[in-house]
Image: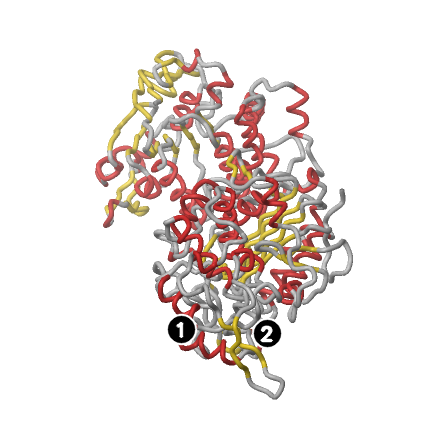
Amino acid sequence: MIAVRGATVRAGGRALLAGVSLDLRPGEVLAVAGPNGAGKSTLLRAMTGELRLSSGEVALDGRSLAAWPPLALARRRSVVSQASSLAFPMAAEEVVALGRLPWHGTPGASRDAAAVARALDVAGITHLSRQPHATLSGGERQRVQVARALAQLDGAPRPAALLLDEPTASLDVRHAALLLRLLRRLAAEGLAVLVVLHDLNEAAFVADRVAMLAEGRLAALGPPEEVLAAGAVEAVYGIAFRTLPGGFVLPRYDAVDAGLAAGVASPPAALPARGPSQGERHAMQRRALLAVPPALALAALHARGAAAQPQPLPGAAAPPLPVVRPAEVGLNAERLGRIREVFEAEVAANRLPGAVILIARRGRLALAEAIGFRDRQAGARMEPDAVFRIYSMTKPLVSVAAMMLVEEGRIGLADPVGRYLPGMDRPQVSVARDGGGFEPVAATRPMQVYDLLRHTSGLAYGELTQNAPVRDAYARAGLFQPGVIDFDSRRMTPEEFTRGLAAAPLARQPGTTWEYSLSSDALGRVVEAASGRTLDAFLEERLFRPLGMPGSGFALPQGGAGRLAMHSGVDPANNNQPVAMIDVSRPPGNASGGAGAVATASDYLRFSQMLANGGQLDGVRILSPATVRWMISDHVAGLAQPLAPGMLLLGSPGFGFGLGFAVRLADGGALVPGLEGQFMWAGYGGTYFWVDPRADLVAVCMTAAPSVARAGYRRLLMNLTYAAIEG
């Protein structure tokens, strides 16, 4: 990628670099080592085009650096120099944003916000994003510069190169190790990495090859175990070394050869080999602006006081939606920041293990927070790509699947369920007698697919119903496991599930009463019968893959065991009573359409935004706008509602139910903020989402906290979010 041939640099009558030839290749880390004055920084500056050669050539992809336009060169390589100083008052994230200036006016500019956010996260400095650069420590400033260089290469054509001059010099041991590991990872992803290092053991750890310089010449080039052998480095450094296991070396400070040490050339004052002067650094900063129009450069340098970019989802390849500053979509960043403060307090009080919270407005991501612990017992912090058991948030997924088949003419809402599920065509209803007890009576009409979508089927949940014959029949069939685990039928086959459901009486006459139930599980079986595919396969092929939801399914994704959000095993809000959650470590016997799926917060945000957009996202149409309006309209007005949808979900009146969602009936009349037409649902495990079409707002909250307090957290998040809306 970068070829150096006979590179020579002379200054003050002395050769700082003398006939050096080497190559920097994609997919490798090349470490440059050597004593003070050996020419390490000079070589790096020559390889970046910053320093003019006296003779020889440096070429990128076979083309001399001198022939590359500055903008084109900046889109292929980025540089982290030894030191950085800024003449402008800038926040850390604004310094990182300078890395995106080469992409101004290109399609890549649309990725700027996301690229900056990703770079901050990869460099481990998201928490410093709003801090003034001038107040940061030397090590923190160096990590900011690494993030700036990464942002510059985000989306760059490959191969691309990253060149770093002593990036660990200001870092403590831990952060130095983290940076070296990052460089290894970047090389594994195809980047060409050159790093100047003083610490030979750092070079041994990180490098595929080591270039050892001495007095401006290339003394050795090859694998670390050869170049850093004790005898070889002794000849260069003039000090005895001991070789340790693993190829590392230990200098013997009691055996310095004064003559050899004195023979190491010192750099002339005319051109310090230890790095550029302050004036040269200012020149480098000016060149970093790369002839961008002055107005844009000044805007970037003086963008003080603007709200910080939201943190993206760094565990993913890209944020789920385009990232935006809260103020750009009418949200107050300071008020939005209360969400993290409040939920961190809940984690600190041991009432929640952790949470991932995403808020989007006008189709763009304005807030992304990973709070607390993914696994508190293991001390594992919450990660944005954590996978959650979403329980009843599976219901909207299967409802969308069914409506896709309705649009294709393969299902009709008036169809009797018995057309698809054997034994469901002649149901009995368990009716309470006046004198006590229950008696079976014939259903007055068939159960329809429409009833499954709106939970008026007469089915129930064994965990919730007071109808004893229904509850007992569910327990006998294995649809309900009292005293063992709630809402888990995953071990059954689809046929066993259908037979058990058909053998049990209904708790209500079909079409008369809204009652939360196994309706969505039965709907999943209908989707399977109508499509000829298992529910998990249908959703993967028709919804998850097209929408870009790789963390969604009915079991942990491959290699995802370390991403599962773990619960504490008890409910702190219920006297620490034991509580169990479904096992998602292996594929289930049946894909439970009511409570069986897993997902990341990012995945569910994309699903929710698709609905907010009227059935499409990023050019992929899942449903027509008319179908989405049909689904998010109230379909249970005038029906009996022993426990209304809003009371079940939020402890609030004011909500009806559509075809898979609770639907807000008016701006007022509810205990939570929002506008008429707002729709939502949640999960037993502590997950929640809502979409407010009139406010152009989408929110997803994922926790692993099956608790009696979960409705309170839903109300809390809604209050905090709407309090941040300014326009």
The reply, left or right, for residue 644 in relation to residue 382 is right
Residue at 59% over, 83% down: 433
| Residue 383: percent from left, percent from top | 49, 53
Q: Is residue 442 above or below residue 187?
A: below
| Residue at far bottom of view | 435
Residue at 43% over, 66% down: 582
Q: Is residue 391 above or below residue 222?
A: below
Q: Residues within 10 Å of mark 2 (few under 14, many from 20)?
A: some
Q: Is residue 368 above or below residue 198?
A: below
Tell us which disc is closer to us: 2 or 1: 1
Callout 1 amino acid: Gly
**Quarter of the figure with the C terminus:** top right
Q: What is the secondary structure assignment of the residue under circle 1?
A: loop
Q: Is residue 294 above or below residue 706?
A: above
**Quarter of the figure with the N terminus:** top left
Q: What is the secondary structure assignment of the residue under circle 2?
A: helix
Q: Residues within 10 Å of mark 1 (few under 14, many from 20)?
A: some
Residue at 64% over, 61% down: 714
- Report the residue marked by disc 1: 478
The reply, left or right, for residue 536 in relation to residue 304 is left
| Residue 653: percent from left, percent from top | 72, 64
- Residue 136 visible to the viewer: no
Taking depth in this image into account, of 115 and 89 the one nearest to the observer is 115
| Residue 389: percent from left, percent from top | 47, 60
Taking depth in this image into account, of 667 and 203 the one nearest to the observer is 667
- Report the residue marked by disc 2: 573
